[in-house]
Amino acid sequence: MDFSWKIVIDAGIISCAMILASFLRTKLKFLQRFMVPNSLTAGFLLLPVYNYFIPWLGYTQNRLGDLVYHLLNISFIAMTLRAKPAESKKTKNHSVWAMSTVILSQYAIQAFMGLILSWMIIKTVMPGLNPAFGLTLPLGYALGPGQAYAIGKGWEAMGFEGASSLGLTMAALGYLWACLVGVPLVNYGIRKNYIKMPPSFSDKGLRSGIVPPDAEKKITSRATTDIEAIDPLSFHAAIVAFTYLLSFLLLTGLSAILSLAGKAGTDLAANLWGINFIFSALTAMIVRKVIDLLKIGHILDNDSLSRISGFSVDFMVSAALAAISLVFVGQYWLPIVVVGLIGGILTLVTTPWFCARIFRDYRYERMIMLYGVSTGTLSTGLALLRIIDPEFKTKVSSDYMLSAGLTFALAIPFILSINLPAKSGMTGNMSSFWLMVAVSLAYFVYSIVAFAIVAKKRAFKNIGKIWLEQD
């Protein structure tokens, strides 16, 4: 019988790379020293495989896009379905808004700088560069590989050839900034006594990525169903899949309504499918709200949902990096290096500058996590935070989760505007490009105003110093 093995083959190849990457981390001091995620190592291992070996066998790497697309949406659903951490008045009034402000400031700074740099490159050495190239910086760094790929595929339909591969390449550079600079930042904070050296800093299990046989195994999920009736993991996976189906039906209905407006509506609907992770998260918010209203929130376990999200992110990152086309990387190496380098330096400077002034507690811990999030993904930020807060006993991770909803709501106009530069590349009219520059500036102005309100008298104290000492 003619069964399709494509998804099984891809999953098997990615799994082989993940296993090999896990083994390499137990042996290579470089990977241990810089806490390089196994999914990132696996992705780099798969680059030559999917660029040269797989095509030689008659397969194409394009089908990895479907895997990346769906895993991205699933990861958003799983994290959004989690119950909110217990809120305190102080957290609600200060830390949550502060976290969101720093995150949005990075969206704005990276978008504005990426757009301006791409415009300068167009006017000097590469006139044929698509104006949307600059937005691969915030897509790859602050948003992540899944979003970079999904939105890049939409740009390809608008004439930006290779946009998805370029977005993924920028995401890979972001991961390198997160790992190769993030871990030294932790060391620097310990030397300066900004943070205390945690017991796990030299933990063999943390460094190697494998829990030693004599170490206590942590509980990473809890059963909310009787295993005789249904396995708890199966139940949580069913809830996630059910929510994903609802998001599909939501977008399908919205697309049908928009199609009534003619070609413009149909084009808008096609673009919305590229940012399905927004609608997936919105649907998950509604499902979670209904569950809470019915007072059956006990059926869901946050840790189990985190495991589903973690699984999705690990495989998504590996698949996303494997999907990079080295042909397009070679063609665009100059703007990639220029935008990626300057963007990384800006993030390295501005994240500590904001964090040192806007936060009142756990300032360095918050900075470390937000730096990891602004150059990689949530998992990268949590990995860096775990070095100095292995049990997540501080409020940093919970405050970030609380801020995610506010950040998501505020970022919707930004994401909905993200196709504007690609439209300029398609029509030759740069007005849409400059409109996106204006949107980036508007977000930056908002970030500065919110920063000044929250940070108060510390906002612009010793403005020339990157890190402000504690009063």
Image: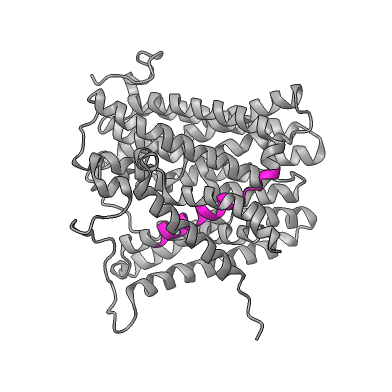
- Quarter-wise, where is residue 383 in the image? top left
Question: Residue 123 or 33: which is nearer the viewer?
Answer: 33
Q: Position of residue 287 (x, y in %)?
A: 43, 65
Q: Position of residue 163 (x, y in %)?
A: 68, 44
Q: Residue at x 48, y 71 (%)?
A: 242
Q: Give the left or right position of residue 125, taking residue 404 as reference.
A: right
Note whether 168 is above or below 436 in the view shown. below
Q: Give the left or right position of residue 207, taking residue 376 as reference.
A: left
Q: Residue at x 76, y 38 (%)?
A: 425
Please identify the quadrant where the N terminus is shown: bottom right
Question: Residue 176 or 266: which is nearer the viewer?
Answer: 176
Q: Is residue 324 magenta?
A: yes
Q: Residue at x 61, y 63 (%)?
A: 251
Q: Is residue 389 magenta?
A: no
Q: Give the left or right position of residue 36, taking residue 248 as reference.
A: left
Judged by its main secondary structure, the magenta piece is helix
Note whether 452 is above or below 308 in the view shown. above
Q: Is residue 123 visible?
A: yes
Q: Residue furthest bottom?
A: 1
Question: Residue 125 or 208: which is nearer the viewer?
Answer: 208
Q: Is residue 76 visible?
A: no
Residues in magenta, as a range: 308-327
- Quarter-wise, where is residue 69 in the image? bottom right
Q: Give the left or right position of residue 156, taking residue 324 as reference.
A: right
Note whether 152 is above or below 129 in the view shown. below
